[in-house]
Amino acid sequence: MADQQLISLVDQMTLEEKIAQLLQLAVPFFEGTQESGQITGPMESLGITDAIVSNAGSVLGLAGAEEVIAVQEAHMRKNRLGIPLLIMADIVHGFKTIFPVPLAMGSSWDPSLAERSAEIAAREAAVSGLHVTFAPMVDLVRDPRWGRVMESTGEDPYLNSEFARAFVRGFQGDDLSGDLNRLAACVKHFAAYGAGEGGRDYNTVDMSERQLREYYLPGYKAALDEGVEMVMTAFNTVDGIPATGNKRLMRDLLRSEWGFDGVLISDWGAVKEMIPHGIAEDEEEAALKAMEAGVDIEMMTSSYVHHLPALVREGRVDESLIDEAVLRILTLKKRLGLFERPTRGADPQAEREIVFCDEHRQAAREAAAKSCVLLKNEALLPLQAEQRVALIGPFAASGDILGPWSWTGSKEDAVTMEQGLRSKLPSGQLTVAEGCGVSTMTGRQLEEAMKAAMEADVIVLALGEDSEMSGEAGSRALITLPQPQLQLIQHLKTLQKPMVAVLFNGRPLDLHGVLDETDAVLEAWFPGSEGGAAVAALLTGEVNPSGRLSMSFPYSVGQVPVYYNHFNTGRPKDAPDAQERYVSQYLDIPNEPLLPFGFGLSYTDFKYGDMTLSTDEISPDESLEVTVSVTNTGDMAGEEVVQLYIRDRSGEVVRPVKELKAFRKVQLQPGEQQDVTFTLTEQQLRYHHSDLSFTSDAGEFDIMVGKNSRDTETRRFRLRK
């Protein structure tokens, strides 16, 4: 179907039919599913008629090949012009085979791994009937109190951008039209959703445009540059205006400046939420402002279908805006091949063979192992074959390790820590006790835990947050482990036996009471379907930990936001001539995070040689080669993440103390040495100036290479112009 044919199709549609294409509804509104007709509560108040449903453009939350086929076929019978539905859902870190949460994937520092995870998720979802996923989320986050930090890849704009590109490539592939195993991706949440005040979900965001462009927009732009098909608006305000009604953000920046011509969709209910935000008096005004801002699809509110027809007839909304939105939606349907094949890749037989297959589970196991971060190890790990192990804690035998947004994943299918360790340890060497619940403890639980621990050589603690403690609407003011778990550590510590803590969680935590009270700590995040198997492989040394933190762990929640690429201030605490008191500091805690961005340990040791620069001065058309030798000085093969940072010593506006510009993950055998070379260009020295121009400054720069953002070697060079 040529573009002219799409235009002709729009011309055949009534105004009401066109506006219904802009509506996205949940599963119960559609014939052909087990939920059909179960329209209660807020859905009932939407005032959706059968005529509206028959012309609706998309459905969210539907999956399963047979149901998708039934819904699409029923819809095609009812739709006057035979326009198929778009089937959308949140496939964030896996469909049925659940991969580690995105924050964990970011800690792999391996974009190819993220691309593979998205490719597998797309394959499972597509054969189950899905067309579009609401992913990736690329919101930069500096506040671990925010629950949706688990859905981000961290605090750095460069690292986030690399993962944004990888996820889009994985979901969409090279030929979205011809490859039925792929999904259209939707980057979210535009813009700056991760910067809500107080780390509270849906909260206000207030920042300068320069800050927005420098740190928060690069991830979205990277996804657009990779060809992402859709963008989702954020719930928050941007410069005082909710994103969903923000014409300057959506039409001026996203569409005009960046040239995005794909589909823009609201988040759930966000159009109507402009009323409580306080920029719309009623749904009519909300519809007007969202349409003027360029929102093509209204998700799960009905302001468009109830009010746009009158707004058009009254001349307050130009019908050409409606036509543009419909044409963008129809173009995506065409690109997915839905006019020729409305059910696209939905295939019940293939679904049974592909979904949660052994190949996909193996890939999830590898991703989980590479995403875990070893935070502490006082010569305890890996476990020795002869050691008797007591596995204790609320996650010892729990399948609640998938994390939020694991929609069709099953906790019952997850490999638990108990299952994983039993497969690795000799028979009879593992004892398991719950010890406490996630947030509760009984005397009997503690008694059983103490008994199991007394009979063991090593205690392995399985601790963390349950999946409801993070994710959307999962903000927490206090980000320590729940008190019963900290008490469990204290009780077990009286036995004076070596203890390993394995943490399952969706955010950086305040680890006081854990890091200081145990001998080894492994951050497992929410590792997904194969989490228990991956953790067991790490604990027993079958796999060497290689993950590195993509977000700083705070010393205290009182520091938050705490992040590596901060400004220096005019009175830095670490200046050579710093006073004792009148400097930028806390009186009661350090300025630095407990664990820095880029940090992670291994079972082997890596020694860095001296850094060399190819020159100490470059012009804008020249490049600088930075070389450092890395040697595995231990007795186990391992992977090291070599990280390169820069600092502009004197900018037109204040520059951060460090900025990640490149990284390389290298695998080294015991005794092996490898030279790692980075090429730095003038383009990598550019930033947004006070007039928002994106240029570099002549002058001196520090270049830093090391194993994390804290432990680096520094050299200096000059950019001349």
Image: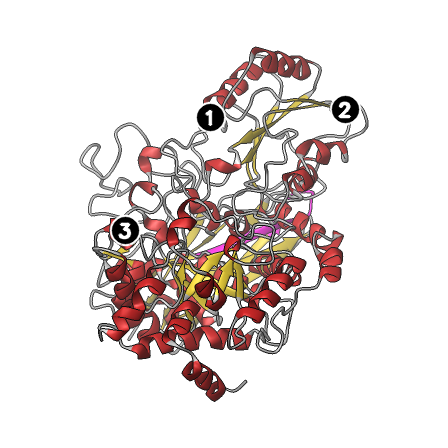
Q: Are marks 1 and 3 in contact (CB under 8 Å)?
A: no
- Distance CA(mark 3)–CA(mark 2): 52 Å
Q: Mark 1 vs mark 2: which is more N-terminal?
A: 2
Label 3 CA crowd tier, 10 Å (few <14, some 14–19, many 20+):
many
Label 1 CA crowd tier, 10 Å (few <14, some 14–19, many 20+):
some
Magenta stretch mostly in which secondary structure? strand
Marks 3 and 2: which is nearer the front? 3
Above or below — where is 123 with respect to 500?
below
- Distance CA(mark 1)–CA(mark 3): 29 Å
Q: What element carries label 3?
A: loop
Kindly tell me whether residue 680 is visible in this rendering.
no
**Residue 482 badge:** 1
> Does residue 683 appear to the left or right of 39 in the view shown?
left
Q: Give the range drawn in magenta.
A: 631-644
> Does residue 592 appear to the left or right of 292 in the view shown?
right
Q: Mark 3 vs mark 2: which is more N-terminal?
A: 3
Q: Where is residue 169 in the image (x, y as percent from the top left)?
A: 55, 67
User: Where does label 2 land, which residue?
Assistant: 429
Q: Is mark 1 on a helix, strand or loop?
A: loop
Q: Are marks 3 and 2 in contact (CB under 8 Å)?
A: no
